[in-house]
Amino acid sequence: MVKVGLVVVVIVVAAAAIVVLMVTVVVVVEVVVVVVVVVVAAFNDSRVFLQAQFHFKAFPLPPSPSASIYGTLHDGLGKAR
């Protein structure tokens, strides 16, 4: 009787460990995906990418906020020197 209970406990603990590992892997993958998306968005402005890909010359996109913020920061740093 004790052996059957021990086997059940081992199976339940193993199943719980597998679930925890699966959840951990999913969370790690999601974090990696979010980091990659943020890095790509920071270094590759999507509007510039769209203009280069599809040549929207007839419908120019407005200037990107990231470019204007970078320009403002750059101007400020230049004046501070």
Image (cartoon, grey):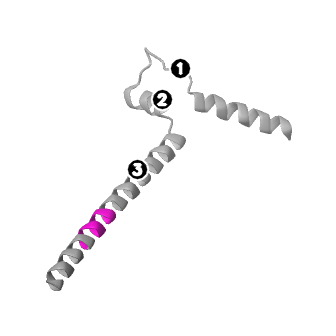
The disc at residue 16 is none
Q: What's the amino acid at mark 2?
A: Arg
Quarter of the image holding residue 65? top right
| CA distance separating discs 1 and 3 | 28 Å
Magenta residues (range): 14-21
Q: Which quarter of the rendering shows the N terminus?
A: bottom left
The mark closer to the camera, 3 or 2, is 3
Residue at 44%, 47% (x, y): give it: 34
Query: Is residue 9 placed above or below 22 in the rendered structure?
Result: below
Cβ atoms under marks 2 and 1 closer than 8 Å: yes
Left/right placement of residue 63 relative to residue 71 reads: left
Dot 2 lies on which element?
helix
The disc at residue 33 is 3
| CA distance separating discs 3 and 2 | 21 Å
Cβ atoms under marks 3 and 2 closer than 8 Å: no
Q: What's the amino acid at mark 3?
A: Val
Quarter of the image holding residue 54? top left
Comes first in the chain, label 1 or label 3: 3
18 inside magenta stretch: yes
Dot 3 lies on which element?
helix
From the image, give the main secondary structure of the stretch colored magenta. helix
59 inside magenta stretch: no
Query: Is residue 70 placed above or below 21 in the rendered structure?
Result: above
Dot 1 lies on which element?
loop
Comes first in the chain, label 3 or label 2: 3
Q: What's the amino acid at mark 1?
A: Pro
Find residue 44 and report its horizontal and vertical position in percent: 50, 40
Find residue 80 and report its horizontal and vertical position in percent: 85, 38
Q: Which residue carries the number 1 mark?
A: 62
Comes first in the chain, label 2 or label 1: 2
The disc at residue 47 is 2
